């Protein structure tokens, strides 16, 4: 169901933004946990030396994905822009 003043597609992009944000947060959590394991236990497994930095390499990818989706969401919904409507007359310029 569409809300008044909201374009179609806003729900889908909002869902994508939430999932990208969750993916970013979970990747950060795994990266921090892997770094802690590496620092405390120093695993000797051969795959560990290549595997533990992998989440850190994915963080910029997910952050960029989230930022692009969030910008798209704001553009679709019309958020983030001051239209001047509903602004009290006694508000002056900030700068």
Image (cartoon, rainbow, N blue to C red):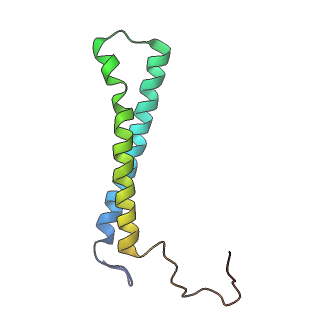
In the rendered image, the residue lying farthest to the bottom is: 89
Q: Would residue 92 appear left or right of 55 to someone viewing this image? A: right
In the rendered image, the residue lying farthest to the top is: 44
Q: Quadrant of the N terminus?
A: bottom left
Q: Quadrant of the C terminus?
A: bottom right
Residue 72 makes an appearance in the image: yes
Q: How many marks?
A: 0
Does 11 sit above or below residue 4? above
Percent from the top left, x then y, of residue 78? 41, 76
The picture quadrant where one finds residue 52 is top left
Percent from the top left, x then y, of residue 38? 44, 18
The picture quadrant where one finds residue 49 is top left
- The residue at the point 69 percent across, 84 percent down is 91
- The residue at the point 69 percent across, 83 percent down is 92
Does 2 sit above or below residue 32? below
- The residue at the point 37 percent across, 53 percent down is 66
Percent from the top left, x then y, of residue 77? 39, 74
Percent from the top left, x then y, of residue 17? 36, 58
Residue 23 makes an appearance in the image: no
């Amino acid at each position: 169901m569409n809300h008044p003043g909201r374009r179609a597609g806003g729900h889908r992009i909002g869902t994508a933004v939430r999932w990208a944000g969750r993916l970013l947060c979970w990747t950060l959590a795994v990266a921090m946990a892997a770094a802690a394991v590496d620092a405390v236990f120093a695993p000797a497994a051969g795959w560990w030396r290549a595997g533990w930095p992998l989440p850190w390499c994915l963080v910029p990818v997910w952050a960029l994905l989230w930022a692009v989706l969030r910008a798209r969401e704001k553009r679709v919904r019309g958020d983030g822009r001051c239209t001047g409507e509903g602004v009290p007359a006694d508000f002056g310029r900030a700068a």
